[in-house]
Amino acid sequence: MAGVALSARGLVVVREASGFRLAVDALDLRGGEVLAILGPNGAGKSTLLRCLAGLEAGQGELTAPAGGPVTMVFQRPAAFSGSVAHNVRVALLGENLSRDEVRDRTREVLERFGIAALAERRAHTLSGGELRRLALARAFALGPAALLLDEPFDDLDAAGQASLSLDLRRVIADTGVAVAMVTHDLRRALLLADRIAVLIEGRLVQLDARDVVLARPASPQVARLVGMSNLVAGVVSDDGRWLEVDERHRIPLAGALDAGRELVVGIRPEDLRLDTERGSGTAVAIGKGRVRSVVNDGVAVTVAFEFAGTQLTGVLLAGSRLARSIGPGDLVSLSVRPERVHAMPADG
């Protein structure tokens, strides 16, 4: 396990005027890892980030066992007047470095983020993406033990997001910095994250490895946040091995559960099998669904359909036989592998 770079205990922030309360008992940032902080609007994600940076008044204890500064890059990064290189040099003023060391470190961080060629350009002329790269270079120039990123991909186009994601992952691996990142872009979060923390109404409701949170969210609300959009309510069968939805639809459970219990099961869209005739392989048939819509982005085909009074979603590869032939109104047989079905209590 990577060493702890920043440790938070008993964080509490209360805003009397709005009634908002953030309460996080324990949270550690580990060197070389990215923690993605997810949650709905108003959950307290940015407040938590500012608490970790020491910028938000409240209760709690922050310790940095690994030493080194904690730096934060804000959602709307700003630049000082002067050149791009000057902006990095300003960040190094208090570091007791020689002129040559400042020059070398400035060049290094600008190269890391692909903007060395812009070193002499006036910072106020940079594009949004270039300005974000400058803000990251300025933060890394300080050699932080922990880096806090608030919406680092905001306002970037798809190409800019992809490029910055790759550069960030490389720099994190090279430096061993611990990163906590708030983003509304689930796809970018999943590409970078080693662990996921989920905040809901100021409470840390789940904290685990990325793949654990994706496969076993703590509640339907968490499931929706991490892309497990197929949620179906029902009652556990007498033998404990099925969720009975109605007389024509039932879903297999990964293990025997208490008979008669009311539960919600979640299935990720990519785990739902679609066939116009039957289920296949190790997947178990769960009933039929009526296709509502088909969206083809050239790579994947997203199919929405009605299943037992609710809407579910499946994904097909563009160009596959079924993807070419399926259309609204079609009746589709659905199946799923039991180990891909996640049972959880209903919200609340």
Image (cartoon, rainbow, N blue to C red):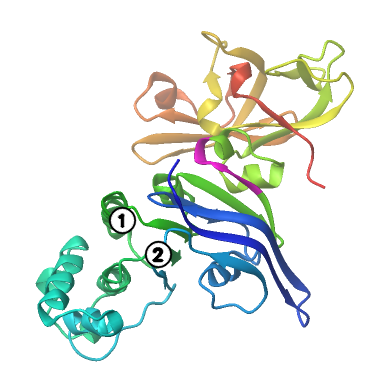
Q: Which residues are magenta?
A: 206-211
Residue 270: % across, % down: 50, 30
Q: Classify mark 2: residues with Cα within 10 Å, few (<14), some (14-19) or many (20+).
A: many
- Find residue 269 and report its image quarter: top right
Please give the label number shown on residue 168: 1
- Find residue 191 and report its image quarter: top left
Q: Is residue 314 visible?
A: no
Front label number (1 vs 2): 1
Identify residue type, mark 1: Leu
Q: Is residue 12 left or right of residue 291?
A: right
Q: How many marks?
A: 2
- State the CA–CA distance, disc 1 to disc 2: 10 Å
Q: Quadrant of the N terminus?
A: top left
- Find residue 69 and report its image quarter: bottom left
Q: Residue at x 63, y 27 (%)?
A: 290
Indicate the secondary structure of the residue bearing disc 1: helix
**Towards the viewer: 248 or 211:** 211
Q: Classify mark 1: residues with Cα within 10 Å, few (<14), some (14-19) or many (20+).
A: some
Q: Which residue is mark 2?
A: 152
Q: Residue at x 17, y 70 (%)?
A: 105
Q: Residue at x 67, y 60 (%)?
A: 24
Q: Is residue 241 left or right of residue 338?
A: right
Q: Is residue 210 visible?
A: yes
Dominant SS in magenta: strand
- Contact, mark 1 vs mark 2 (Cβ under 8 Å): yes
Identify residue type, mark 2: Pro
